[in-house]
Amino acid sequence: MMRGLFKQKLFCLLALPWVVSFVLTSCDQPVEHTAGAISDRDSVPMMVSYGVNTLISDSGVIKYRIVTERWEVNQNKKPSRWYFDKGLFLEQFDEKFHVEAYIQCDTAYYYDQQRLWELRSRVRILTKDGLRFSSEQLFWDEIRQELYSYTFSRLVTPERTLQGTYFRSDERMSKYYVSNSKGSFDREDVGGSGQSTTDSARKSQDSLLMKQRGQMLPYRNN
């Protein structure tokens, strides 16, 4: 009996250094702690506003009024942009703060560094002169003060209707071009009388075919 107890104590004494050594070694090994991946900073907007109704000015002159349900500003994307994914309504003003046109669409991007608007889906314009424009996509270049589209567009004035796959106009839509087009005209337009110098599309609109370029988003000529 005594010999058995003695053997057990001797075994414990001999095994103790190995146990201590194993514990110390285990404590010295670093443990790696992992966490969930952080979302890409490029996707984080610097501002999101809801229920917006505000005036936008340029060089001290009010250019237009923005009305939208959601306005996102993202300076981290390349190029930086404003994003309107819940629809956009614009009132465009002249230098004397008179309404030039009403513009609306389902989705819009504004590339602030390029001063370029891209309007998408159910784009509609109504000018003070009664001109109506509709398309599924439209670009508005504020630097060049022009509008253009590479998709099917329809233009309706009190005198005529034009439609085609390429559209370009000045910012006030007083001079415009439609190519690959078809349309209806007044008899006086065909006969040559009563022509307006502000309507560039009235006479032989298909003779104004312009070299079409591949679409780039966004796009601007140098």
Image: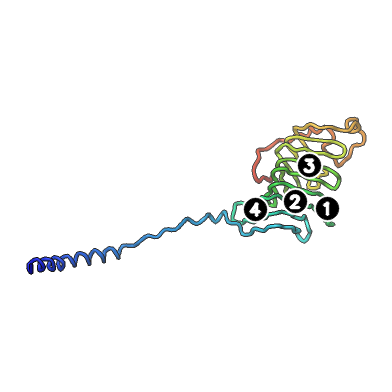
**Against 141, is 73 above or below?**
below
* Residue 33 visible in the shown view: yes
Q: Residues within 10 Å of mark 4 (few under 14, many from 20)?
A: many
Viewer-side residue, 59 vs 107 = 107
Viewer-side residue, 89 vs 69 = 69
> Dividing the picture into quarters, in which one does residue 189 lie?
top right
- Return the residue at label 1: 99
Picture coordinates of residue 21 (x, y %)?
A: 22, 65
Looking at the rendered structure, the secondary structure element under dot 2 is: strand
Mark 1–mark 4 Cα distance, whole angstroms, equals 25 Å
Q: Is residue 18 left or right of residue 138?
A: left
**Against 150, is 25 above or below?**
below
- Return the residue at label 2: 89
Disc on the earlier residue, 1 or 2: 2
Q: Residues within 10 Å of mark 2 (few under 14, many from 20)?
A: many
**Against 88, is 185 above or below?**
above
Disc on the earlier residue, 3 or 4: 4
* In this view, the mark in front (3 or 4): 3
- Return the residue at label 3: 133
* In this view, the mark in front (4 or 2): 2
* In this view, the mark in front (1 or 2): 2
- Return the residue at label 4: 81
Looking at the rendered structure, the secondary structure element under dot 4 is: strand
Mark 3–mark 2 Cα distance, whole angstroms, equals 15 Å
